[in-house]
């Protein structure tokens, strides 16, 4: 099933809203979510990876078909923006490692979009 262009843009907007909400989540909320999830890794790291994979996949696949450079540029811009914004969220810190996690998610999304073409 292929999304219409309008629905693909809606999915991108939803992913962006979720990303920005998660970025501004206070550290205490993040820590509690991690505690109750009982996962061996931080839930926020996984959420960022998956969100960036989704953004890259939707942007690169049909019907949007953004260029590779555009997708990478948007992903890098969002990764840097979200890390910058985390400096202003209670109990959160910016991290270059998180930028790498975000870009790894984007790379997976690009790979999945390529294999779908």
Image (spheres, rainbow, N blue to C red):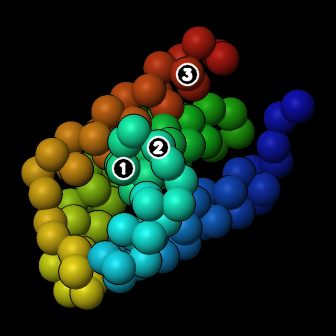
19 or 45: which is nearer to us?
A: 45
Quarter of the figure with the N terminus:
top right
Given this view, does label 1 or label 3 mark the residue nearer the observer? 1
Quarter of the figure with the C terminus:
top right
Residue drawn at 59 percent across, 12 percent down: 115
18 or 89: which is nearer to us?
A: 89
Query: Which badge, 1 or 3, comes first in the chain's sequence?
Result: 1
**Is the residue 32 above or below the residue 41 in the image?**
below
**Is the residue 10 above or below the residue 107 in the image?**
below
- Say which mark, if any, is on residue 112: 3
Residue drawn at 48 percent across, 65 percent down: 33
Residue drawn at 49 percent across, 31 percent down: 109
Left or right relative to 6: residue 24 = left
Q: How many marks?
A: 3
Evaluate if marks 1 and 2 touch, with contact meaning CB atoms under 8 Å apart: yes
Residue 105 visible to an observer of this rendering: yes
Determine whether the residue tagged by mark 2 lies in a helix, strand or loop: loop
Mark 1 to mark 3: distance in Å?
Answer: 24 Å
Given this view, does label 3 or label 2 mark the residue nearer the observer? 2
Residue 30 in the image, given as x and y percentages of width and height: 40, 69
Left or right relative to 17: residue 79 = left
- Say which mark, if any, is on residue 42: 1
Residue 71 visible to an observer of this rendering: no
Evaluate if marks 1 and 3 touch, with contact meaning CB atoms under 8 Å apart: no
Residue drawn at 43 percent across, 77 percent down: 29
Left or right relative to 6: residue 31 = left
Evaluate if marks 3 and 2 touch, with contact meaning CB atoms under 8 Å apart: no
- Say which mark, if any, is on residue 39: 2
Q: Residue furthest top?
A: 115
Query: Which badge, 3 or 2, comes first in the chain's sequence?
Result: 2
């Amino acid at each position: 099933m292929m999304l219409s262009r309008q629905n693909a843009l809606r999915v991108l907007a939803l992913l962006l809203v979720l990303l920005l909400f998660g970025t501004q989540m206070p550290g205490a909320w993040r820590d509690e979510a991690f505690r109750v999830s009982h996962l061996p890794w931080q839930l926020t790291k996984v959420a960022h990876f998956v969100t960036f994979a989704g953004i890259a996949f939707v942007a690169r696949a049909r019907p949007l078909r953004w260029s590779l450079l555009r997708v990478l540029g948007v992903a890098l811009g969002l990764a840097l923006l979200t890390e910058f914004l985390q400096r202003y969220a209670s109990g959160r810190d910016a991290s270059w490692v998180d930028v790498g996690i975000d870009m790894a998610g984007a790379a997976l999304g690009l790979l999945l979009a390529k294999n779908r073409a």
